[in-house]
Amino acid sequence: MKLSIYSLKKILFAGEAMLLNCQTMAGEITVLDNHESLIGVLTPGVIKVIDNNKKENFFEITSGFLEVRQGNEVRCMVD
Amino acid sequence: MDSPQNIKKRLKSIKNIGQITKAMELVAATKMRRSQEIALASRPYAFAALDLLANVSLMEEQKSGLLEKRNVKKTLFVLVASDKGLAGAFNSSIFRKFESAFSKTKTSEALFIGVGEKAFNYLSKKNLNVVKKFTNVGDYTTTQQVKPLADFLAEGYLKKDWDRVVIFSTHFRSALKQESRIREILPISFESIQETLMEIVPKTGKFSNIVNVSNVNGQRSNVDYLVEPSTKIVLADLVKHLFFMQMYHLILEANASEHAARRLAMKTASDNAKDLGQALNLQYNKVRQGAITSQIIEIIAGAESLS
């Protein structure tokens, strides 16, 4: 899936990813390929991203939004 | 004519001033570029958030909180100026704009906030009802510095302390041109947010071509989103966030303008110092030459009287 993680300072991640794991207000969720369209509010914690090279990336956040769009595209806006 | 010693002294001090203003000019130029870079870095984030807001507001039509339009009883005026002086016409143009706009409003219906030491001084000198001041925004704006201001504005609006917020700030058109602008930021309209986001990039110059890089598609998708926990909470959070971002951009823009104005003022100052230095140098040479001539005349006169 196409994943982009933006923060106010810079673009944290942009590219293809296999897995995205994050904490939302409704609990911890993991987004895989072809996830259903979803909008969520992120809570403080660590976002885990595994990109297509099986490399793990971690981002610490304090707040943010998650949007899973149609067409296998995921966007995160974090602080 | 002045004595050569006096001229020499003045020449020296002018040279020093020229060096100082030259240094300040360079510093301001670098800071201006940095401010612009910071604004650009937050651009993708802002557009993604706006896009999301458009999607969410499609689902939840009900307008509440910061989006709600009320009858205007009290208006809050926010003046964004600088902490430090020596920035040319930067502060005075804001104040002039404010005066011409404010003359129509009654003082009893207005509240004021000064952002920057100069704005606060100006408002308190006029004996206006200043609610709060925000200073030390600093050279490079960070989110932590803008947060208190944005929170304060939003909270007061929700508590109905004021029904409208008008902000006076400087719009950064290019490194050479800045304009003071009046913007209504509360209640929030999406158009005004979008406008603010677009504005920070100058029409000409180094950063002007970056506008097209970020992809904003205006088309709205009619997808059924699964919203967690609820549209209402997401919308409230998102709106608050976007408001904060708009404030952030406004302050950034004012910051970039301040540095640009200072750069220009300092450039003029160092040019003037250079001109003055040249004129004084000429005068000094003339005086010196005069002194030498009169000494030679004295010597010749003395020699002739002896022979």
Image: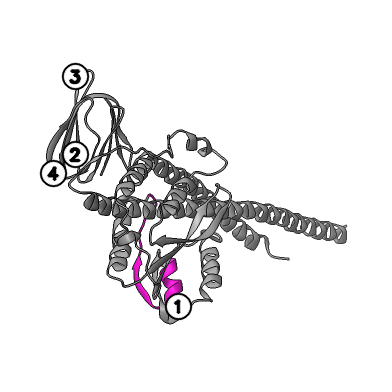
Q: Classify A56 as above or below B163.
A: above
Q: Which residues are magenta?
A: B118-140
CA separation, marks 4 and 1?
52 Å
The mark lying in front, picked from 4 and 1, is 4
Does the CB distance between marks 4 and 3 fall below 8 Å?
A: no
* Residue type beneath disc 2: Glu
State the mark number for residue A60.
Answer: 2
**Residue A74 at what x, y percent from top left?**
27, 32
Mark 4 or mark 3: name the one nearer the start of the chain.
4
Residue with the mark numbered 3: A54
**Residue B182 at what x, y percent from top left?**
50, 62
Same subunit, tags 4 and 1: no
Same subunit, tags 3 and 1: no
State the mark number for residue B125.
Answer: 1
Give the chain letter at badge 2: A
Residue with the mark numbered 4: A26
